Every structure is written in C-alpha cells, then in structure tokens.
Image (cartoon, rainbow, N blue to C red):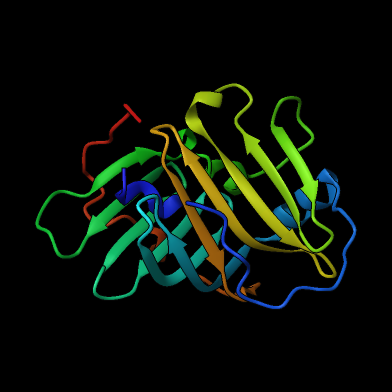
Amino acid sequence: MKAFGILTAAALSLATALPAAAEKLSLGQISNYLNGLQTAQGEFTQINDDGTISTGRIFIKRPGRVRFEYDPPERTLVVADGDTVGIVDAKSNTTPEAYPLHRTPLHIILARDVDLTRERMVTGHASDGKTTTIRAQDPENPEYGSIELVFTADPVELRQWVINDSAGARTTVVLGDLQTGVRLADDRFQIPGRGVEQRNDR
C-alpha cells in the first residue's frame, strides 16, 4: 500500500559523505543508541515501492511517537501517537486511515526498550566497512514485516531504513542530519480526527 510506505524501495546511497572505514557496530551498541534517542527532528527523503520520491520533515519522540510531514504537492501527514499510526491526506476529504503501531516494523525502533539481542529479532547483521546494516523483525510476529536499519559510527547515527511491510512493499527513508535532544510537544503527535476506525487487517 503506497500510503503506508511512509513508514518505509531499493537501496539508496547515503546522501552524506561517509568515513573511509568503520568497525561493525554490535547489536548492543545499536540498542543503546536507539534507547538513548529520545527526541529528534530533521529532513528525510523517501523512495516509495513504485519508485516515486517524496521529501519532508520527521519528528521522533520515543517511545512510540513519530510524525512525517510531507512537502507539497503531496501534503500527506503520517503520525504515530504511541498506539496507532494515522495517515492523513490533506488533499482528500476521506477519513484518515489508522493502523495499530505494533503491527508495523517501525514499532521495533520506537519501542520503550529496544533490545536487538533478543532471540530471532535480528535476521541480518553486516558491515561494508563504512556502515553497519541490520535487518530486524518482531520475533513473535514475523508476518508483520521487517525493517533494515543503516548506521554510521563515530558517533553512532541512524542514517536510513527500509521497511518491508506485510503486503510485500518496500519503502526507503533516508535521513538528513538529525537534531537530537530537542523539545517536542506531545500534541504534535496527536492524530487529526483520532476517532477514525482502526484497521487491523494489515
């Protein structure tokens, strides 16, 4: 589903220059980094499953909250409020779509306590000498899809993710430089029209 692709396409080279070489990050290092990432904001570029490209700004407030504001002409808004992911199309009068956050691969990095060392959570862990990439899934519900996370080191930073959702679509999100430790009001993560019916079939 294209709209849900916000939370996720073919691999894209990182937009910024990378170090000449870097050691492979351990799962413990990556878990500690994600657990320490309480708030962040920055720009992103998204490559959708159909090859189209979108841009916008992302706001993260862990646990459980993220907001994607898409640039015109798209004008889509995607918000996770801790329990639900809401997708709002500002160009349409249709009711916003809503999905349980725990059924999306993005839940893995938005969890209150990220522990990538859990059995069967990480199904891939590799380094190309410049970045470390892991592929993770919900070990209890692998049918929910998976997320591939790309990190640089020194300091550890999340630069990109690829979401493979339950419908078989791939969506890549490439992050610009993230501002961390920023103050973000809780109401930024409220879903407009929150009373919408939640879909549990995906």
Q: Is residue 150 visible?
A: yes
Q: Is residue 12 above or below residue 115?
A: below
* Residue 77 placement (x, y as % from top left): 31, 62
Q: Is residue 185 visible?
A: no
* Residue 87 placement (x, y as % from top left): 29, 52
Residue found 85% across the figure and 73% down from its top: 20
Image quadrant assignment for residue 169: top left
Q: Quadrant of the C terminus?
A: top left
Q: Is residue 166 above or below residue 161?
A: above
Image quadrant assignment for residue 201: top left
Residue found 51% across the figure and 46% down from its top: 163
* Residue in front for this viewpoint, 184 or 73: 73
* Residue 176 placement (x, y as % from top left): 58, 74
* Residue 78 placement (x, y as % from top left): 35, 57
* Residue in front for this viewpoint, 63 or 101: 101
* Residue in front for this viewpoint, 171 or 139: 171
Residue found 80% across the figure and 56% down from its top: 128
Q: Is residue 149 above or below residue 198?
A: below
Farthest right residue? 23
User: In the figure, is residue 96 to the left or right of 176?
Assistant: left
